[in-house]
Image (cartoon, grey):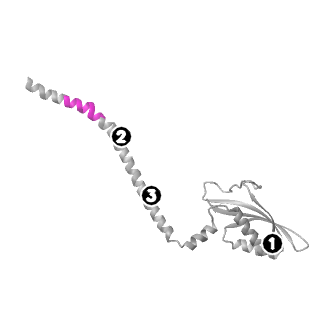
């Protein structure tokens, strides 16, 4: 009996090890490790695709003429730069013969504010801000000023315009300008 008991005990012991330790380990921690490895491999594949796309976009950006990039940065800057814009508008008005008397940065509600608010949705890539201008000068000076605004390297829209008459030939103008920037 000794000859048959040893193989039967070994078989029973091996079945206990198989069903008691190996199968639970295969279905538990090893299965979790395999699924984590698969997830990590997907993340690595996505990172490799992202890196390849980033390299392609960088090569395309580097192929663009730097002068065109500078012009684009002036046309649609990456910040509002109120002070620079007001100085440019004042210089344009001076060259045109207009006198600017009041410039206000307007909030979203249309009134003056100390903290300018964007008129566009914050999720959009382009922001907008309104400026209220009051000026005085002749009609020819106004035409020259508006032509300068039209040909400005900065993207500006005249959204509202009011002319107050005068017998002297010097008119008062109230204008609303909208400026844009890249967020």
Circle 3/circle 1 CB separation < 8 Å: no
Name the quarter where the N terminus is drawn.
Answer: top left
Q: Which residues are magenta?
A: 13-24
**Residue 143 visible:** no
Q: What mark, if any, has residue 98 been given in the picture?
A: 1
Q: x, y percentage for residue 95?
A: 77, 75
User: Could you give the CA–CA distance between mark 3 and mark 1, rounded to whole angstroms?
Assistant: 53 Å
Number of the front mark, 1 or 2: 1
What is the magenta segment's predominant secondary structure?
helix
Tell me whether circle 2 and circle 3 mark residues in contact (CB < 8 Å). Answer: no
The front one of 88 and 13 is: 88
Distance, label 1 to label 2, CA atoms, is 75 Å
* Residue 169 locus on image (x, y percent): 88, 74
Q: Which residue is label 2 attached to?
A: 32
Secondary structure under badge 2? Answer: helix
Q: CA distance from mark 2 to mark 3?
A: 27 Å
Residue lying furthest right in this view?
Answer: 167
Of the image marks 2 and 3, the number of the one nearer the N terminus: 2
Q: Nearer the viewer, residue 88 or 178?
A: 88
For image coordinates 57% across by 73% down, the residue present is 67
Q: Which residue is mark 3?
A: 50
First of labels 3, 1 by sequence position = 3
Where does the image place residue 48, in percent across and percent down from the top left?
Answer: 41, 57
Callout 1 secondary element: loop
Q: Residue at x 44, y 58 (%)?
A: 50
Q: In the picture provided, is 27 more to the left or to the right than 182?
A: left
């Amino acid at each position: 009996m000794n000859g048959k008991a040893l193989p039967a005990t070994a078989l029973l012991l091996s079945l206990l090890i198989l069903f008691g330790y190996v199968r639970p380990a295969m279905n538990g921690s090893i299965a979790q490790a395999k699924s984590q490895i698969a997830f990590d491999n997907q993340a690595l594949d996505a990172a490799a695709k992202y890196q390849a796309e980033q390299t392609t976009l960088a090569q395309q950006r580097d192929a663009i003429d730097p002068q065109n990039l500078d012009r684009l940065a002036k046309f649609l800057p990456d910040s509002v730069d109120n002070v620079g814009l007001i100085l440019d508008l004042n210089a344009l008005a001076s060259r045109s013969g207009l006198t600017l008397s009041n410039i206000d940065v307007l909030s979203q509600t249309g009134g003056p504010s100390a903290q300018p608010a964007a008129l566009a949705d914050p999720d959009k890539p382009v922001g907008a801000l309104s400026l209220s201008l009051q000026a005085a000068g002749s009609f020819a000076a106004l035409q020259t000023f508006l032509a300068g605004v039209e040909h400005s390297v900065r993207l500006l829209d005249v959204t509202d315009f009011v002319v107050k008459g005068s017998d002297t030939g010097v008119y008062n103008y109230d204008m609303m300008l909208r400026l844009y920037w890249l967020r």
